[in-house]
Amino acid sequence: MFIYMQVRIKRFPGRVISNLLFCSLFKNVFCKYKIAGIVYFLFIQASTVEAQLKSARQIISPYRNVFVKPSGQVPATVAADAPLLGNGYVAATIAGPPEQQNYYLARNDFWRLKSGLNESFPAVLGKLQISIPALKAASYRIEQDIYNAVTIASFSKGDTSVGIRSIMAATKDWLIIEVHNNGRSTVAGSATLLLPGNDQFHINPPLENKFPDTTASGQNKNGLQWMQRGFIKDVDISTMAAAACKILNHPSNQFSVAPGQTIRIICAVSGNFKSGNGLSFVQQQVQQATVNEIEKTKQQHLQWWHRFWNESYIDVADSVIEHQYYKSQYNMASCSRDPRFPPGIFGSWVTKEIPAWNGDYHLNYNYSAPFYALYSSNHLQQALPYEAPLLAFMQRGAYYAKKVTQIPGAVLYPVGIGPLGIESTRKNELMIQHGSGYIKSGEVEDEGLFFGQKSNAAYCAVNFSMQFYRTYDAVFAKRIYPYMRAVAVFWQHYLKKEGNRYVIENDAIHEGTIGTKNAILSLGLVPMVLQTAIDMSILLGVDQELRSDWKEKKEKIAAFPVQIRNGKKKVFRYSEEGTAWWNDNTLGIQHIYPAGQIGLCSDSSLLQIARNTIAEMQRWKDFNGSNSFFPAAVRVGYNPDTILAKLHEYSLHTYSNGFQLNNPHGIENCSTVPNTINEMLCMSNQNVLRVFEVWPKTQDASFSSVRCEGAFLVSAALQNREVRFVKILSEKGRICNFQNPWPQKQVLVKSNMRKTERRSGERIQLQTVAGEELLITSL
């Protein structure tokens, strides 16, 4: 006879628990009985668990992005400091004083597409302007509820008070705006759809020019406004985007709102890549919109965002860090969902044409960095767009590999690309006439701007590697493998045998450091590429004949160069020959992260050099590289109190929207806080799963469904200096090498598919089954 009680706990991290739980989970949860020599456990206090673990709603819903003055830099060619709305396809940036709220509109798929230096960039579409003259000199406050992805503006002056509630609908490309009169007097205004004005163009000849576009706009007798803009002349691929707008149940764009009343404005935005004839599509959408459909869309919007937040979440005892964590996740969810058009440097929020660095996909870290945290955060839908431009560029990459390095069957990527195979930094007449320095310096090879770096394609592979090891998804691997194979083949043949090792020559560590030997970045990236290609080929059952050569090259590649810095401790050198050190940026530690070649299982002397390098560099608030510096510090076990203190400072150094203060680079730092916290709470590199390993044991924390290497979703809680439980969901049934967080104790491993086990030891090997849930607690 076996006595049990089935219990469902809605807010248990990661998944609903519907199995027998054990008394060791919390000491006051279970009563323990022995009947005829058999141990039975009776669950008696389910509410105890629920009380100690918060839900995503409880954690995230209190956080607001608050803006108390209008933007000071919109429109701009760099990152906006304003409220940001988006659904991963279309976006709006809010700027302007209370009496003239401007929603700057952009789409991920609206680019000028022409391969050539400064000829390809994400373009601006225009803006929706809400004018209410009575609000001139009114107070200003905009709050963004990031849990519900709702933006609420409040403007008041005397008896006049107006609230404007806005969403960029998650399930339709609709901007929905509700203007409510909270005051005691009627307010009048207008909603006007405008093509880009002069302030939205960055024209600085001879290198930055206004290119010919096609525009049209109009309004019908029912108050429906529309506009269209595109590039069809002198481009490689034609593009067109359109928007239509209407005040619901109203015959014009002028409005009058009595006290207590609300008007609704709907603005639909589309383009030729998503809906063919974008103009007719958005006109039809707006013309047929009803109050009921808008309300239904708002509910779907909330449901989508709530699902997103429940994919993974954390709870740490620092509201500043936690707020920045969720700001960052909100921004990535808002700008990355279109599977063919990922966000560029500034996300979806392009307010001025031409944006800095052409707003393109810069492959020597800027493009990859925003996505780092999405894999561990289990936000795979936001990660999906990353692959499209890299795969689309393979034909041109193969051309460069063969032309520049004489390696067939491989790829070599330049520094800048766009979507659909576009090369945003290709040599053209503009470069020949006005940017010839690139050519004379040798930074251009054939038609590609490489800055002397051979590492761009390998750098882009880091995110593919992260997703592969965290999912072991054969469909993903099959889709990505041609790219990984081509990058592996490149390095297989580019490496040069020197004695008993393989070296890398003529690969710049920093842009323009021509002639460098054994750049430390590539010494980290190449083994990562080769090992990932090997493991993908094994999973897919292909290219067995290549694996031994890849394995040999990986194992015999040159060691990381080191030096004595300032006559003190041994640290890493940026290259074996060439650049020794750099006073900013973080290339000196990127072999640790994102390349992942050093971790807590590494040789102790190597770990000490890594920690010395972190201490010497101190790039906690670096203009470019904080997104790799923080997680590198975690990976090598740097002091967790120091990491959290620096992360707290970093999180305070932001605009209200989460972008780094006085840093023009946009979304690349959206990964910094989430990635660092995820790694501190749950680290899974080097085939070992560790919870709270680099986390202050005095600081309570919990996390839900962090995605780990091996295709495991992991949840755990640390309370009162003790790990209370670890829960592991195995998606693929792989072996989990679990670092015991109770090293001096036995543990209970409870499965939903087999008998409970008692295990012990510093590291416990768990053979799992696909779909199995393990609940691990100490005895």
Image: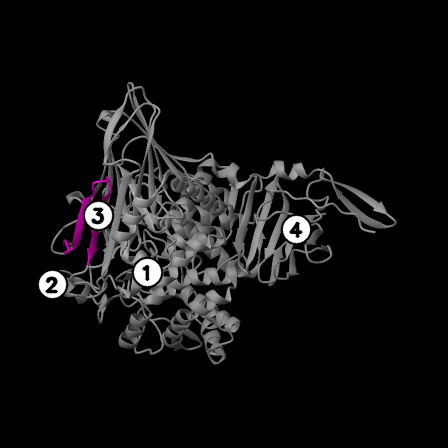
Q: Which amino acid is tagged 4?
A: Leu
Task: Mark 3 or mark 2: name the one nearer the start of the chain.
Answer: 3
**Residue hosting label 4:** 775
Q: Residues within 10 Å of mark 1 (few under 14, many from 20)?
A: many
Left/right placement of residue 630 relative to residue 178 reads right
Q: Residue furthest bottom?
A: 545
Q: Residue at x 64, y 62 (%)?
A: 769
From the top left corner, tell me how far across and down residue 587 is, in percent: 36, 57
Real-space CA distance between mark 1 and mark 2, rounded to the nearest whole angstrom: 25 Å
Helix, strand or loop under label 2: helix
Amino acid carrying label 3: it is Met
- The residue indicated by pointer 1 is 363
Residue 601 spot, x, y in % from top left: 55, 59
Does 135 appear above or below 584? above
Instruction: Kindly identify which numbered label has been placed on residue 227.
Output: 3
Q: Is-magenta flag for residue 194?
A: no
Of labels 4 and 1, earlier in sequence is 1
| Residue span colored magenta | 209-231
Is 513 in front, or is 318? 318
Question: Sequence order check: which comes first, mark 3 or mark 4?
Answer: 3
